[in-house]
Amino acid sequence: MPIATPEVYAQMLDKAKQNRFAYPAINVSSSQTLNAAIRGFAEAGSDGIIQVSTGGAEYLSGPTVKNMVSGAVALAAYAHEVAKNYPVNIALHTDHCPKDKLKGFVRPLLEISAERVARGENPLFQSHMWDGSAVPLTENLEIAKELLAKTAAAKIVLEIEVGVVGGEEDGVANEINEKLYTTVEDGLATVEALGTGENGRYLTALTFGNVHGVYKPGAVKLRPEILAEIQEQVGAKVGKERPFDLVFHGGSGSTLEEIRAAVDHGVIKMNVDTDTQYAFTRPVAAHMFKNYDGVLKVDGEVGNKKAYDPRAWGKAGEEGMANRVGEACESLRSTGTSLNG
């Protein structure tokens, strides 16, 4: 299928919320990891979201170039072409963008999509994230309000973060403390500033103990009941059941019970990065250890071209990552839910 149109993306999000499942949002940083992600969704019979971070976009442009916009545009162009060959819908998203990178990442990409829409085309990306977790809530929401007007005009969904995700991602680190828990007051301030959809659709990452990085199950104290409390109290205030379309960040180390509780409370998108990175790399490492005398020219020998051909270990990595994407679909209950049946 072609990359999801704005209308198809809206149908995807609506279906997830109505039927209490969530889409894995898989971070990619290369054509190989993008292919692996789409394959995983297709094999699971799930529509899905593929996303690129600022660091991933830099890498995609070339490690010596480091142009976030070029990398993101190149990824989107590639995705628009290869996604046509699969039977599921794929939406493209840009991940965490802090204040100091807005001007060099999200804003130029928004302009590109606005120009495309003005020509009668679809936007390049279906959603963008503004990560204002490092600035005061008032400033966070002021910027979000300004961006929401632009994303709505370009037929794009905005994602925001209200609260702080601990740990480290793409060089942005936050402490693990009480700030990891969003409050009802934070939720009320959000709907007061942005509305509940009438000013443009947005996704909200409310934090409930989320931490980026690598943690064993049980090592992170997640409190999904916070999501239920915010949804209930804000919903009562605005007269709308489960008013927020929620995003789950920092899910590594979460138990299946915690994940599904969050989904029951309105999470419709869950970011997956650390786990799929490992799932890609582990089979590659196994290939290298098993074929060390083929990938290396040991003792003056010539090695084995079939072993060091990047396609050989690349296929292994893609299969491992695709399998992990399938596991994520199963955990989030999106398996077999594609709009295409």
Image (cartoon, grey):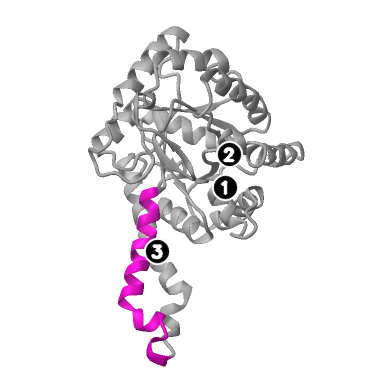
**How far is disc 1 from disc 2 in space, using C-alphas?**
9 Å
User: Which residues lie in the magenta part?
Assistant: 274-301
Identity, as a three-letter code, of the amino acid under mark 3: Gly
**How far is disc 1 from disc 3 in space, using C-alphas?**
24 Å
> Is 59 left or right of 248, judged from the image as shown?
right
30 is higher (above) or lower (below) than 102: below
For the point 54% across and 42% down, the residue is: 93
Question: Which element type, helix, strand or loop, lies under badge 1?
Answer: loop
Identity, as a three-letter code, of the amino acid under mark 1: Ile
Q: Quick one: label 3, few (<14), some, or many (20+) residues within 10 Å?
A: many
Q: Which mark is residue 317?
A: 3
The residue singled out by tag 2 in the image is 126
* 134 vs 79, nearest the viewer: 134
115 is higher (above) or lower (below) than 150: below
> Is 181 left or right of 91, judged from the image as shown?
left
Image quarter where the C terminus lies is top left
Q: Is there a contact, CB below 8 Å, between mark 2 and mark 3?
A: no
The residue singled out by tag 1 in the image is 3
Question: Which element type, helix, strand or loop, lies under badge 3?
Answer: helix
Q: Is there a contact, CB below 8 Å, between mark 1 and mark 2?
A: yes
Whether residue 17 is visible to the viewer of this picture, yes or no, is yes
Q: Which mark lies nearer to you, 2 or 3?
A: 3
